[in-house]
Image (cartoon, coloured by chain):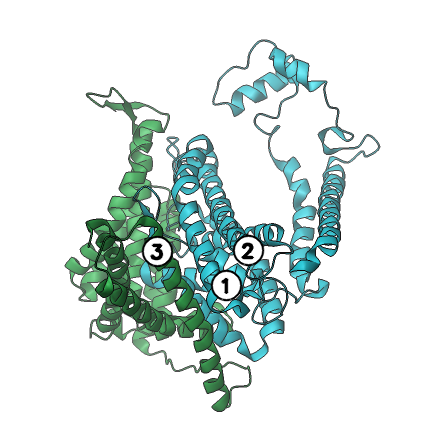
Amino acid sequence: MSKRSRGYLERTLDALLEVMDRAGEAERRAADRGLLQRLDPRVKVVGALALILAVALARNLATLIALLLFAIAGVAVARLPFRLLATRLWIGTLALTGVIAFPALFTTPGDAWFRLPVLGWTATAQGGTSAAYLLLRVVTAATLAFLLVFTTPWTHVLKALRVFRVPAVAVVVLGMTWRYILLLLQTAHRMFEARRSRAVGPLPGRERRRVTAAAGGVLLDRSVRLSQDVYLAMQSRGFRGEVHVADEFRMRASDWAALGAFAGLTTLFVWMGWR
Amino acid sequence: MHIPDGYLSPVTSAVLYAGAAPFWYAALRQVRRALHTRLVPLLSLFAAFSFVVMMFNIPLPGGTTGHATGVALATVVLGPWASVLAISVALAIQAFFFGDGGITTLGANCFNMAVAGSLAAWAVYRAAAAGSALASPRRAMAAGLAGYVAVNVAALLTAIEFGLQPMFFVDASGAPLYAPYPLRIAVPAMMLGHLTVAGFAELAVSAGVVAFLQRSDPSLLQAGAGRRELPASGGARGAGSLRPLWAALGVLMVLAPLGILAAGTAWGEWAAEDFADPAARQEIASASMGHQPPASAPSGLERLSSVWTAPWPDYAPGFVRSAGFGYLLSSVVGVGLVILVFLAFDRLARLWRGAGGTAG
């Protein structure tokens, strides 16, 4: 088998495996017994979204750094390993946004900061500040979202969205989509694995595209058939088109205290960010 | 193309949530009517499918690989409205659970990819595949072209949103607060990758999967061809259910006079005589970061400014005294003209399909 054709099939397999792995890891971590895991999911969703909004609103670097430190403290309180945060989130996010932000050092007009030795490009202070804004915002918002997903089971996150008046039908569709994503990921993974096990020679480019398109076509066909099966199963259980979401959450004193703390901190960060 | 949190200002994010909302509402109305109780399982499975397809590595000529969004495929199989919802759901799950695309920017991502992408894919697919048989190679190519155009439309919108950030959102020192590149950098940088790689990945997946379905299960392509209402919304039309879109358009038209609240004239929209007027020269200089305009109007501008005279110069017909009312009237007439042009195109397309479309 040629290196190129192996690479292409394996890259798809890796991507599929990584998504499944990440989903499983998030579910396992959400079941841990850290302080944040015990809070009411609605409080966590409201708190995380409010803080992410504060990140978007901040107009100075000090506030963004304070928000990042707060998010990192949250990771420690939730007893999530920092290795997980670094490997799952920071390395990828910093690399991607770093590549995007770096040229801004030289393209943003402003006061000269330093000169690149060989190329002679002049970096500006405003360019540096702008790159720092972008990196800090992206990393902080992603860390807060990570904190929410890794401390709350996905079904609870979705149900908690009802706080924002998200229609019940959207919550049900999101929940069902999540469940079938895992199933279709497994199906796709098996298809590519089976194809790889039968590939003995180098696949020309055209053939590789044909294999991918066929995998997509089969998956689409299966999705539509599966939706019909699921529909029949739902009907047999009495489904008549109306969807309901059970409200199973109960606010305790600690949840109210956490909600108050999130509200106070968000107000503080927004105020700091606007100064 | 998935915009993460931090790249767009909260104002831009809110505007794009507001821009996507009427389409979500209209799509939900259309799809609910077409699918009835099958809405939940079909949408869920299709959103899950779109999500998984986005993970595929698409081999491209030249040895590179790319990823597809699946937007044209969803549009071809489900119709544009169900595609808007399915892709939005897939994007929401990516944003919430995989950190792929932000939460504050979810409205922008849905507007660019799910809404604009689906509608662009639908327009191109319908135009390019009009009248062809379900199994015709033209239909597969039309799906590929729809994918290519849809991804590039979404990329262009993303680039414009990025490019607008440094124009409006900078801190006290002048450093851009969000995406730092102006339009002249953001648009070419974004479009280069999409016109050459991502667009072709989308083309390959869309055309390849449609060609596969033509051989294995052509019935799945019927809805996109407008021959069956289920599972798509292709046949479900009705002016009543498009009411939110008309309402949003109406609100935007009424808001048009807000333009006169903006200080001075729009940057770059100067008339030749403005270069001779000291007050206008001052305005141009302050809007151009202190750069003084040339002493006299550029000769090209002077020459070309007399080529075309608008019937309503400066958006205010001569008989209207109030600038606000002039703006409103201009926006109503402008929108009316655009709608008339599209109705005329639609009518022509129907006549053409009626004459030659019986073959398929």
Q: Which residue is mark 3?
A: B100
- Report the amino acid beneath label 2: Arg
The chain containing the residue under callout 3 comes to B
Q: Amino acid at mark 3?
A: Asp
Asked if disc 1 and disc 2 are in contact, CB closer than 8 Å, the reply is yes
x and y percentages locating residue A191 in the rendered image: 30, 67
**Closest to the observer, B77 or B135:** B135
Going from the N terminus, do you reach mark 3 or mark 2 first?
3
Identify the subunit bearing mark 1.
B
- Identified at 23% across, 75% down, the residue is A31
Label of residue B139 in the image: 2
In this picture, residue B191 sits left or right of residue A196 = right
Colour green maps to chain: A
Compare residues B324 and B76 and report the one nearer the observer: B76
Residue at point 53% right, 74% down? Answer: B39
Q: Secondary structure at mark 3?
A: loop
The alpha-carbon separation of the residues under discs 1 and 2 comes to 9 Å
Mark 3 burial class by Cα count in 10 Å: few <14, some 14-19, many 20+:
some
Q: Amino acid at mark 1?
A: Gln
- For the point 61% across and 9% down, the residue is B296
Mark-to-mark CA distance, 3 and 1: 33 Å
In which quadrant will I find the C terminus of chain B?
bottom right
Q: Position of residue A10 (x, y in %)?
A: 23, 58
Same chain for the residues under marks 3 and 1 in the image: yes
Colour of chain B, in one word, is cyan
- Of the numbered discs 3 and 1, the one sitting upstream in the chain is 3
Residue carrying label 1: B214
Spatial CA span between label 3 and label 2: 32 Å
